[in-house]
Amino acid sequence: MSKSNDPARVASRDWSSSELREALASAAEWVLAYREGVESRPVFPNVEPGEIQARLGAEPPARPDPFDRVLADFSEDIVPGLTHWNHPGFMAYFASCARGPSVAAELLIAAVGVNAMLWRTSPAATEVELVAVDWLRQALGLPADFRGVILDTASTSTFTALLAARERAGDDVRRRGLFDAPALTVYTSEQSHSSIDKAAMAAGLGLASVRRVAVDERFRMRPEALSEGIDADLAAGARPSFVCATVGTTSTASADPVRAIADVVRRHDDLWLHVDAAYAGSAALAPELRDPFDGWELADSIVVNPHKWMGTSLDCSVLFFRDPTPFRASLALTPAYLESEEAPATNLMDFGLSLGRRFRGLKLWTLFRCVGTDALADTFRGHVRMAADAADRLTSSGRFELAAPVSFSTICVRAVGAGEPDELDAGNRDILRRVNEGDSVFLSHTELDGRYTLRLSVGSAHTEPRHVESAVEALIRAADDLARTEAVAVGTE
Amino acid sequence: MSKSNDPARVASRDWSSSELREALASAAEWVLAYREGVESRPVFPNVEPGEIQARLGAEPPARPDPFDRVLADFSEDIVPGLTHWNHPGFMAYFASCARGPSVAAELLIAAVGVNAMLWRTSPAATEVELVAVDWLRQALGLPADFRGVILDTASTSTFTALLAARERAGDDVRRRGLFDAPALTVYTSEQSHSSIDKAAMAAGLGLASVRRVAVDERFRMRPEALSEGIDADLAAGARPSFVCATVGTTSTASADPVRAIADVVRRHDDLWLHVDAAYAGSAALAPELRDPFDGWELADSIVVNPHKWMGTSLDCSVLFFRDPTPFRASLALTPAYLESEEAPATNLMDFGLSLGRRFRGLKLWTLFRCVGTDALADTFRGHVRMAADAADRLTSSGRFELAAPVSFSTICVRAVGAGEPDELDAGNRDILRRVNEGDSVFLSHTELDGRYTLRLSVGSAHTEPRHVESAVEALIRAADDLARTEAVAVGTE
């Protein structure tokens, strides 16, 4: 047998303790400087497609570089090309913030590097996940018969719920596939996330199976339209199987009336109710923000993403469900090499497509321990207040009108003016461009009632009232500037 | 607007710089002590299901604890319940090792916390991923027309490839679903991973669509059996759509004859060839280990998991493919709020189910930079030698016989003896239990030809020849002990 001090063998080993020590110290220093200085960086980078790639070298290196050299290249060549999701001026999309405790937890997760596929493959990783998910359940006020699992994203969680619903419909899709099944149909509102479409495509139901149910003037699903849609499909021989209500829709953060939707769903056997609360779900930690969730406790499954508003860092999506049976029926398989004797143990790989599973429970657990539910709830209250204040400032400026009621910490506005709709759309697009070019805030847009709409969502633990005020001022300034030009008539004057 | 120094607001903010500094310093110290001391821990913990959960408290904490307190609880209550995948004696399943550079990279990934769903949502995160994946392609010797994307696990990568194949079959499954489609069929060997079954279930094809093709005496798919299976399905009106060859099967690490399989596949229109090289693929970095991969360059898609043998830390699965069109056709959807103007940019969310995507490219890039392809290849060579040496020692002891040819760094053995098959199975089970109870090595088992089989796979950068020697000695000692008892007759004496 070769000697263990063979030079080639030594080179192929992992870093020594001192190399790891120096690298972690350098990385930690870099992280601290980055987090302290992120506010002075442009939120959205000024780069062209392909520019970063061109800096990084076409071929893999044969020989190693010291970590400090690699870190310097990261800092100089890569970081200037990042969109800074942890910048306090990031108010685009929905925030995905990485609070300090989750950053520290990710270091621990990587270092122990365990796999939580089976209880046996790392018992504590499974059990910490079960504990952290149950803490979240309690904090959100969900009943004790909900259990949950951590998946990567809401797209995956919703897909996994759809597979369970597809199985519970009773056609033995697990074994026979969908080839001889009746046409299963899916219901969600016009304002729901594209992940419902994607889940239907991936699950083999197809886009044509998805019914986009009409919304009311506040962008909430109309339960009577849902009921009519289901009846029409039944009459046509389809099998309604999955209803996805949303609390916190992607564009306006509107909340579907879950209780009324649940009443419709309960009139039909084996129709599954899923609630997409990926963004807004966290807000249920604050009891006074719970009204929009009324009825979600009646769902078969719920998705809440702690990596959004709560700040566990990407990725950490919790799928809650009541009955594990249809999940196991749709996805569980235990190959011989993974058979084990711990019958009462939970094997979390049975509740998702992925076999390998990171120790994500640790970051959710660490966040709860290091922040506590009181301060988490305060975060959400604070963000909701900031959004309400921003909406007041924008509308009272006379330059903007609300495009939707303010919901949670998300506002949708449009600059007002006397022009044609197309001109106003162009003006609003120009305002967004100007605001984002200012580098200190990053907003996104959406389309509502066919109109280009500006969108501001507060959701990062790094965002303070002054940052939201800056965003408001930038919006008003851009609208003022535009109103002064002749090209586009925006503004009330 | 509320003041930013409102106490409740301050409590709801993220850690201060000094809190983060102290936490990262404590976490790094813990990580260093853990990595230095992991060898003295039992690889597999001595805990009962529910034991860790009971230690962690039933309710979420309302108030925060300082990080050092949380870290102490992690260390005392949680870590003793982990299975230590980075222990040098971990030789179960396939290794998933977290090399130092990937641990440091995970800290950076968490701290910047960006989302690589669209180019726009963090241009450098997309471009680093493209560069790192292309470096891997070059290092593996794959042709330049392969591109790739990082997904979480091989289960997801194979599922994603199956969706592309399902779409390319031409039934417009994207829109219409599978309800009116001809029965699509999937082919893989009896020795393939359960993830192919799981992918077929999730994709709506069902377990009945999966043909488990017979293997030869070396556990390799028989191409003529594949060909006959396809012909029989065609004759029965099914539509063969997906063939998954494996290089490095789960039990024995056998390699299917990919070139001969590709020849069969090419005789049929729109039959997709996928190669599952999740574990073994990394070995192609060493040119002299490439023979078993002959023909994989003819595949439509290939999965290689750098989080296994290469050591990027979980999760990092690379799905290579030639033609992006069927992937986009099966999964791409761009909602209005994500529409952007960077037409030439790659939006990686179009190549997977998940919308949110971690900055995984950074850990693969960092690993290449800090280790280099020469030392990576040496790692694989070293592990292959260690496995070959172990197999020699075990068979020459007279106590064990090979249950399969040694392939890559994985060996399958059985203790030999004069008893009935059931008695020998019981004896081998007992040997595994004894070896694993010794705490310094963790092996797993499998079933081959209906017989209980012991399995040892070398794949961690922390494993040195002395650790494999210890495992070999523990196996021989356990077989010796057992041979001395009257209860089970194992051994040649």
Image (cartoon, coloured by chain):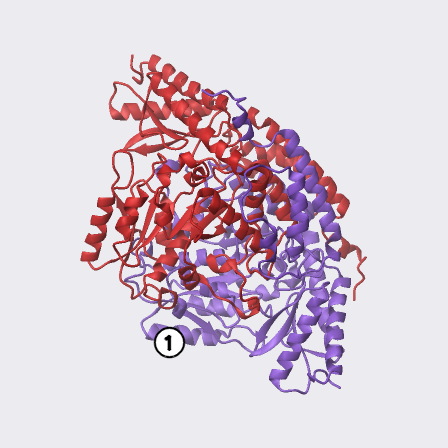
Chain colours: A red, B purple
Q: Local crowd at mark 1 within 10 Å, few (<14), some, or many (≥20)?
A: few
Horizontal and vertical percent for residue B488? 68, 83
- Against A349, is B190 above or below? below
Horizontal and vertical percent for residue B359? 54, 42
Horizontal and vertical percent for residue B304? 56, 57
Residue receiving disc 1: B232
Compare residues B453 and A221 and report the one nearer the observer: A221
Residue lying at 39% horizontally and 54% vertically, measured from the top left: A161
* Callout 1: SS: helix
Q: Which image quadrant is residue A163 in? A: bottom left
- Against A224, is A417 above or below? above
Residue B334 left/right relative to B25? left
Chain letter of disc 1 in the image: B
Q: Which image quadrant is residue A434 in? A: top left
Quadrant for the N terminus of chain A, please. Answer: bottom right
Residue A50 in view of the camera: no
